[in-house]
Image: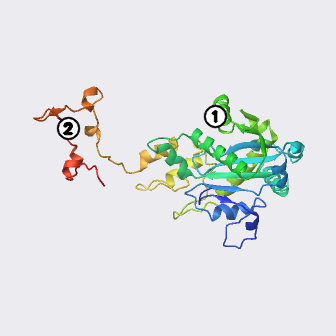
Amino acid sequence: MDDNEMNISQEELTSSTNNEIPKRITCRQDFTKYFGKSDNSVNKIYQTEVPQICKDEPCQLGVDEAGRGPVLGPMLYGIAYAPISKKQLLVDLGCADSKTLTEEQRDGIFDEICNKSNEIGWAIEAISPNIISNSMYRRCKTSLNAVSMNSAIDLIKGAIDAGVNVAEIYVDTVGKPEKYQKMLKSVFPEIAKIVVAKKADSTYPIVSAASICAKVSRDHALRAWNFLEPDIQKEYGSGYPNDPVTKQWLSDHIDPIFGFPQFVRFSWSTAETILDEKAVDIEWEDVEATQPSKNQKISMFFTKTTFNGNGEPQRKKHNFFTDRCLSNTITL
């Protein structure tokens, strides 16, 4: 993992002071300080200590996300894993699709998952709005589906590298389940069972557990968001593009030159529309004249060969070499 990610080792399980990012998340309240002191312009990964039983016994691992649709805030990907022999434990904890639970229920189940740290492990990745937008705008665009799949794969790899004995993987799909499942099987050929399905979070308790970890962590990430920009109002509604309160917040927090705060996914159409209406127009340099013609002959890519008095071919050097007085050498 890189510098933007946090791996937790046994030696690091120490109490943190008020000025430190918690090294261990033992309950939902720890998320407030964890995200409140984070650099929100980069992704962050948190992974729990792997229970010994999850190293010794075959485990099932679930994957789900929270915050895919909003125009505001990070998208959170979560995984949860537990021994296959402990399936009933997840049911007893009340693991269900996080969208069907109240916030109070989700928070309570998450704390119970943390209390079962000797039997259940989990990890999350907070994908920055900045990273999401830049990925979708770069020259070689990365779609939101690709961002999601890459996060899921990295979290699964992180668990395996940490020693989790993964035997079964269950994933709530993005895109077509069949295509996603085939891709995961090619990445993890050693895993005996991989299931990618729609609404997996309401079918498989281990995916429900991952869904709860992702949703609870996103809720706290939003509350604890550290705005670097001045004079930001915290009442932004649900964060979804069709929310009038969210739209008004976007209109109220646009800078005509610099655009939106980092809290905004500016690649969303709702944000783009407001940028078009309220931001200063930018005139880009016209590069069309330097672009090659659409109808090109293959002969354009070759130069004619001329011959000297001895009948030997002479090749004209590229301007790069002649302008710099460079010549060929055969000895060093």
- Residue 156, compared with residue 10, is above or below; it is above
The reply to whether residue 51 is visible in this rendering is: yes
Left or right: where does residue 42 sit relative to residue 117? Answer: left
At 72% across and 52% down in the image, what residue appears? 123
Which element is circle 2 on? loop
Placement of the C terminus among the 4 image quadrants: bottom left
**Horizontal and vertical percent position of residue 114:** 81, 56
Label 1 Cα crowd, 10 Å radius (few <14 / some 14-19 / many 20+):
few
Say if residue 215 shows up in the picture.
Answer: no
Q: In this orientation, which residue lies closer to the viewer: 274 or 53?
A: 53
The residue located at (52%, 43%) in the rendering is: 268
Instruction: Write down the quadrant of residue 182 in the picture.
Output: top right
Quadrant location of the N terminus in the rendered image = bottom right
Q: Which residue is mark 2?
A: 315
Helix, strand or loop at mark 1: helix
Q: Which mark is residue 161?
A: none
Residue at which label 1 appears: 183
Q: Residue flagged by tag 1: what amino acid is it?
A: Met
Q: Is residue 309 above or below residue 38?
A: above
**Position of residue 218 in the picture relative to residue 275 (left or right):** right
Residue 212 pos. (x, y %): 76, 48
Q: x and y percent of residue 255 in the render?
A: 44, 56
**Mark before the other along the chain sequence, 2 or 1:** 1
Q: Nearer the viewer, residue 85 or 310?
A: 310
Residue type of the residue flagged with mark 2: Arg
Task: Quadrant for residue 145, please give it.
Answer: top right
For image coordinates 68% across by 34% down, the residue present is 185
Question: Along the line of sight, which residue is nearer the eye, 322 or 282?
Answer: 322
Colour pattern of the rendering: rainbow
